[in-house]
Image (spheres, rainbow, N blue to C red):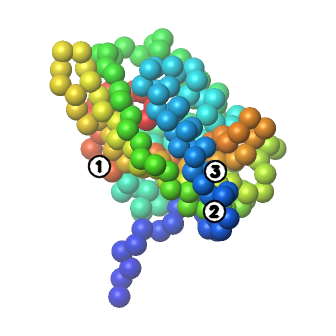
């Protein structure tokens, strides 16, 4: 018998048994995801890398490649520095027809915790503790070009690894797994 269940690509996950910890994590991550979406929708791009640790990773990959374990990604940024370079390019050098985005994010499901050592690819950071929090959040991004009707731009899920810092939770990695095999042209702004 063949099992069609996609492989777990989040690491070795241990459920969070303490309900108070689980609720606090969900509240904080939901709040951070709302701030993240607002920053992108308001084109406050300078704020975007600040959701990540310095060595944070941001990847946009198709569901097909994710489920097959294939590394090919539409975008793969390996640090805040690379994110800042992308923002500089988006705001200063890339010419494109203007458009607005609107992110709609679901409530977060905190999947559990995983050892930092289980990250693949590994993140080299001296600030990471031994354990990361793992979450999944569905998203939909709508795009509106001036004088045109709004269209669905991208739909999928964020698969995230979070770490606790003195200033609160920060993303160690955000993998945006988009559902469609086709992507609309002008994939410019972060999801």
Q: Secondary structure at mark 2?
A: helix
Residue 177, image x and y in percent? 42, 49
Q: 10 Å neighbourhood of mark 3: few (<14), some, or many (≥20)?
A: few
Q: Quadrant of residue 29?
A: top right
Is residue 76 left or right of 143 when viewed as pictured? Answer: right
State the residue position of label 3.
Answer: 24
Which class describes the residues within 10 Å of circle 1: few (<14), some (14-19), or many (20+)?
few
C-alpha separation, residue under disc 1 versus residue under disc 2: 38 Å
Q: Which residue matches tag 2?
A: 19
Q: What residue sits 57% from the left and 38% below the top?
A: 32
- Measured from the top left, where is residue 141 in percent x and y? 35, 36
What residue does disc 1 label? 181
Mark 1–mark 3 contact, CB under 8 Å? no
The image quadrant of residue 64 is: bottom left
Q: Label 3's element? A: helix
The residue drawn where x is 43% and y is 35% is 191
Nearer the camera: disc 1 or disc 3? 3
- Looking at the image, the residue that sits furthest to the front is 20
Q: CA distance from mark 2 to mark 3?
A: 9 Å
């Amino acid at each position: 018998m063949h099992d069609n269940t996609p492989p777990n690509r989040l690491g070795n996950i241990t459920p969070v048994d303490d309900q108070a910890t689980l609720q606090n994590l969900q509240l904080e991550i939901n709040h951070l995801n709302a701030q993240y979406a607002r920053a992108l929708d308001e084109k406050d791009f300078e704020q975007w890398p600040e959701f990540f640790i310095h060595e944070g990773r941001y990847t946009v990959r198709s569901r097909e490649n994710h489920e097959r374990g294939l590394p090919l990604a539409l975008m793969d940024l390996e640090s805040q520095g690379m994110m800042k370079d992308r923002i500089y390019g988006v705001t200063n050098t890339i010419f494109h027809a203007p458009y607005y985005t609107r992110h709609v994010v679901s409530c977060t499901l905190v999947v559990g915790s995983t050892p930092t050592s289980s990250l693949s690819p590994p993140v080299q950071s001296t600030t990471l503790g031994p354990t990361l929090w793992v979450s999944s959040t569905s998203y939909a991004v709508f795009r509106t070009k001036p004088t045109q009707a709004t269209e669905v731009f991208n739909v999928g899920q964020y698969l995230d690894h979070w770490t606790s810092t003195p200033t609160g939770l920060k993303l160690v990695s955000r993998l945006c797994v988009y559902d469609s095999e086709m992507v609309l042209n002008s994939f410019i702004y972060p999801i």
